[in-house]
Image (cartoon, rainbow, N blue to C red):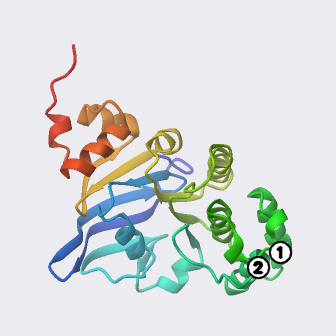
């Protein structure tokens, strides 16, 4: 667990969090913390509760029960103050398609209260290699360009916390590697805390300090990638992910005889 000035700083605190939609428990009794500067993977198969958890952390959904604190403030009670210091990126959220790349970023920059947005927008377009598409309509972008546009938006307000929903989805291997390098650089230089989802387990092993595995809305494993693999006796995070997707639990992996 990362520390700042020798003292652990819990930036995200989730305690006994649950969210029900009628009889369905999308998130059930979830508890975890993320410290300042950590990159933590929120993992699990489709339907595990990852997106619901992110929406609860962003105040887009109200918990059925439980508590959330972000940067020392309670969510959703202090949602506005929290959102001024965090940001979110998802390739699955639509932006206005009739605005250009530049116009979309300018609108969000104004919403975030940037006084001089143009230099910031220019720098981010260069960083994520979108400068050539600045005047293109957002609706005409490729899926990879849209992913990078969402990342540009997420960095506009220099967030202390980033929630990233599959930040390298639709990117070719070269651009994905560059995005991972940018995330590492930002984490090192500014101690930005990141919680993100991904189905790319090789990426997770390279990037994450810790991982949180969800299944059917419950936390079933957490720790560094190495700790989780040792505890479950899985050969890789990918094998663990596949087991959860097929069986919904870690029982089969943990019970497997060790190879001799």
Say which quarter of the image contains residue 258: top left
- Give residue 101's mark: none
Task: Give the residue number, with chain letter if any, for mark 1.
Answer: 135
Q: Residue furthest front?
A: 140
Position of 235 with respect to 107 (left or right) is left
On screen, 64 above or below 145? below
Q: Residue furthest top?
A: 260
Query: Counting residues from the N terminus, which is met first, the one under dot 1 or under dot 2?
Result: 2
On screen, 150 above or below 195? below
Mark 1, residues whose alpha carbon is within 10 Å: few (<14), some, or many (≥20)? few
Task: Give the residue number, with chain letter if any, for mark 2.
Answer: 100
On screen, 28 above or below 58? above
Q: Residue at position x 79%, y 71% from top?
A: 121
Across and down, in percent, residue 146 comes to 64, 67
Q: Secondary structure at mark 2?
A: loop
On screen, 223 above or below 40? above
Residue 252, visible in the rendered structure:
yes
Q: Residue at position x 49%, y 47% from top?
A: 2
Say which quarter of the image contains residue 56: bottom left
Residue 123, visible in the rendered structure:
no
Mark 2, residues whose alpha carbon is within 10 Å: few (<14), some, or many (≥20)? some
Q: Secondary structure at mark 1?
A: loop
Across and down, in percent, residue 69 comes to 40, 72
Position of 191 with respect to 165 (left or right) is right
Q: Residue at position x 85%, y 76% from top?
A: 118
Position of 58 with respect to 129 (left or right) is left
The reply to whether the C-beta atoms of the residues labelled 1 and 2 are less than 8 Å apart is yes
> 231 or 133, which is in the foreground?
133
> 84 or 201, which is in the foreground?
201
Marks 1 and 2, Cα distance to the nearest angstrom?
A: 5 Å
């Amino acid at each position: 667990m990362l520390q700042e000035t020798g003292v652990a700083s819990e930036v995200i605190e989730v305690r006994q969090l649950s969210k029900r939609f009628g009889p369905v428990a999308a998130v059930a009794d979830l508890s975890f913390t993320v410290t300042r500067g950590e990159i933590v993977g929120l993992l699990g198969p489709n339907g595990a509760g990852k997106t619901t958890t992110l929406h609860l952390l962003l105040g887009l959904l109200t918990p059925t029960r439980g508590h959330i604190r972000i940067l020392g403030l309670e969510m959703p009670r202090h949602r506005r103050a929290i959102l001024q210091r965090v940001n979110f990126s998802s390739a699955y959220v639509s932006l206005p398609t009739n605005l250009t790349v530049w116009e979309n970023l300018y609108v969000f920059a104004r919403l975030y209260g940037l006084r001089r947005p143009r230099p910031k927008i220019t720098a981010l377009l260069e960083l994520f290699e979108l400068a050539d598409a600045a005047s293109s309509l957002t609706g005409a972008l490729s899926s990879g360009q849209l992913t990078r546009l969402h990342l540009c938006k997420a960095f506009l307000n220099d967030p202390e916390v980033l929630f990233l929903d599959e930040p390298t989805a639709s990117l070719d291997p070269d651009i994905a590697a560059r995005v991972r390098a940018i995330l590492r650089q930002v984490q090192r230089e500014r101690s930005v805390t990141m919680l993100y989802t991904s189905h790319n387990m090789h990426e997770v092993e390279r990037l994450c300090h810790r991982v949180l595995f969800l299944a059917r809305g419950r936390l079933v494993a957490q720790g560094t990638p190495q700790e989780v693999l040792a505890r479950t006796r899985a050969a890789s995070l990918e094998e663990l992910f596949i087991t959860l997707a097929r069986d919904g639990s870690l029982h089969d992996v943990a019970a497997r005889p060790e190879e001799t």
